[in-house]
Amino acid sequence: MPTYRLSKSIGSLLLIVFSIACQDSNPATEKAPAAAGLRLITDSHVHLSPDAQSIERALNLFERNGIDRFCVKSAGPYGSRRFAATAALGDRLGDKFAYFCNLDWTGVNEPGWAEREADRLQKAMKRGASGLKIFKALGLGVRDIQGKFMAVDDPRLDPIMRRAAETGAVVALHTGDPVTFFDAPDLTNERYFELLFAPSWSFSDSDHPSRKTLMEARDRLLARHPKTTFLGIHLANMPEDLQAVDRLLEKQPNLYVDTSARIGEFGRHPANEVRAFFIKHADRILFGTDIIISPSGYQLGSLSIWPDEEKDADRFLMAHREYFETDHKNMDHPTPIQGMWTVDGIHLPEDVLEKLYVTNAEKLIFSKRR
């Protein structure tokens, strides 16, 4: 490999370690924000363990930071204990809370699997779910009877997609992952540090399908089910290419996207270009963070290599606000482990912010709870 790339990668790695280690010494980050005076936000992409400790932690965090409502994307399959606990939380919190169920891949290669999951989806919607979240296991984890990865547009999914259309369920898709996760996880990879601590996130081996193959299959699935409403999370997992997301949104009127855990990627584009994209598609983009809240603590948009504290979670949420609401330059993005580059705020107009933060999630997700 070229010497300059190796040196640059080592330098970046050391900078990451130093910067994270020194965060707590910065007086500007010590004061936790208060909800008073903050614009209220709906976080449409949260993962919450439905136990008493995690729920209390989440409610306190969201109250401090002006998160008025939130949607859990990992309620589990209908019939599971996790789903029952999440649904009970929905009964308790009412309009402040929404949730998506998930597929159970057990028996995927057996006759009747798709019909079983379609029926479970219908029951979940009747119980109060707003949709179905399909994780990246589709395409990158689940294997067919021949041992090959199940394609994102596998025909076995069709009964589930049709039932989603019939019941009004939104299908949230996590297809693929960042571009660099498909590159060799060596020192030339700009997210080497992240992959070092999460080696299972690397898909560079020849066994896994290419990112291009995954995205093309995803697009075929969207086109094949025009009556189903889809939510492409992580900005359709193409934040590195805003033009590609723009073309996909224009081509697929049944598709929405969210911002979860990708400010660090789409924030690398010139701020004026990102701002124009958000204004153009103001009715199709939902705010989300992808925060994980569990008994062990937080995961803030990516893995946590040591426990994150309350002030770290506060800082994470405020970094989102600063990016969307201000024109500040050279800001740290919310998840530094993804890379130590900076981003420039896009200072969205008031009406666009309201759609991003509230209106779109209300229309797409929370209206289904009533």
Image (spheres, rainbow, N blue to C red):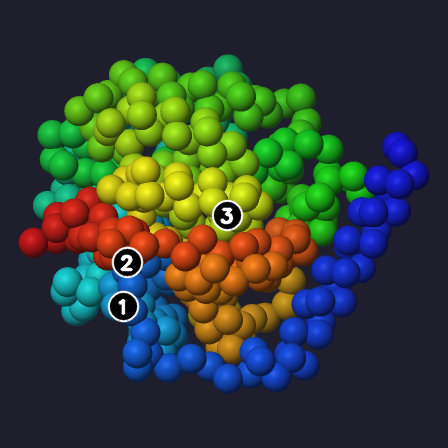
Residue where numbered disc 3 is placed: 271
Spatial CA distance of label 3 from label 2 is 17 Å
Spatial CA distance of label 3 from label 1 is 24 Å
Depth check, front residue: 97 or 107: 97
Q: Secondary structure at mark 2?
A: helix
Q: Secondary structure at mark 3?
A: helix
Say what amino acid the circle numbered 2 marks: Glu
Label 1–label 2 contact, CB within 8 A: no
Q: Nearer the viewer, mark 3 or mark 1?
A: 3
Using the rendered view, name the quadrant where residue 104 is placed: top left
Q: Earlier in the sequence, mark 1 or mark 2?
A: 1
Write the residue at 33% across / 29% down. 249
- Counting from the top left corner in percent of width and height, residue 53 is at 38, 75
Say what amino acid the circle numbered 3 marks: Ala
Using the rendered view, name the quadrant where residue 133 is placed: top left
- Counting from the top left corner in percent of width and height, residue 306 is at 63, 68
